[in-house]
Image: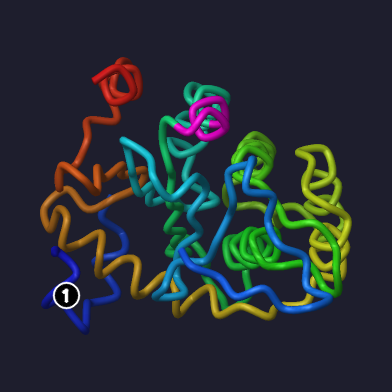
Amino acid sequence: MRRMGVLVALATSAFLVVGCAKEVTGVAQPDPAKPPVSITEDGNGIRAGFEDVPVEVEIYTEPQCSHCADLQRDFGDDLATFIATGQIAVTYRPLTFFDSQPDGYSARVVNAMFEAASPADGDGPATTGPEFQRFVEELWANQEPGGEGPTAEEMAEMARSAGIPEGQAGRIAKGEMGFDAAGASEINYEYLYEIDPIDTGTPTIYDLLADEKLDVYDNDWLSKLTSS
């Protein structure tokens, strides 16, 4: 697979281009009738969708990328529908290369994404795939490139509006930075560079099963995937 031999170091300037589960007493288990959300094995991505699906894609995205906001505006609702019906699974691999300081705008959004995808404390319900997709749509629809970005409470309200359970939304509201967003961004950029070392930018959509980069400027890219 393409994960073999990824680059381990990249120049900072490059960023400018453009299951099985064991049941544990007292821990909530995902509803098998609803598409789950999970953190990828490498810990740097968030997968929304059933395990056995005909289409799997990765979406590389940056919270301040205006073209990423366009992607969510144009295809977000359809992605939520296809995730819900088991036609597709989407793995988000976020990057933070527009941040000028640690724990900046993009890092805080990425942290909220991982809080939404993580299990609830205690026996609270888990976030579902469509709920997570709608949360992503809300985050990018309220984008403020170059600005201060949404507050923790504002992101929590977006999460609640998207249907994210209160256990996860409450953690988002606290604004605690419990995830290494910058570290995840570095690893995800290595994957992204391996996909396309020439036109390396966001948004990038990668078809995991076909092992190919999709044309984000093709208005029919999603319908072609789900109808094949």
Question: What's the image's color scheme?
Answer: rainbow
Residue for point 29% across, 75% down: 12
Residue 20, x across and y down, in percent: 49, 68
Instruction: For the N terminus, give its image quadrant.
Output: bottom left
Instruction: For the C terminus, give its image quadrant.
Output: top left
Is residue 86 placed above or below 17 in the rendered structure? above
Q: Which residue is mark 1?
A: 6
Residue for point 31% across, 42% down: 205
Q: Which kind of residue does numbered mark 1 sit on?
A: Val
Instruction: Count the labels in the image.
Output: 1
Residue 52 or residue 87, whichever sits in front: 52
Side of 19 relative to 117 (left or right) = left
Residue 193, x across and y down, in percent: 20, 62
Q: Secondary structure at mark 1?
A: loop
Residue for point 60% across, 44% down: 129
Residue 141 or residue 213, whichever sits in front: 213
**Residue 87 image-quadrant placement:** top left
Side of 56 relative to 25 (left or right) = left
Side of 117 relative to 98 (left or right) = right
In the displayed orientation, state which residue is furthest to the bottom. Answer: 8
Residue 110, x across and y down, in percent: 59, 62
Side of 184 relative to 110 (left or right) = left
The magenta stretch spans residue 151: no
Residue for point 62% across, 38% down: 130
Magenta: main secondary structure: helix
Q: Callout 1: 10 Å neighbours few (<14), some, many (20+)?
A: some
The segment highlighted magenta reads 80-86
Residue 227, x across and y down, in percent: 30, 17
The magenta stretch spans residue 81: yes
**Residue 77 image-quadrant placement:** top right
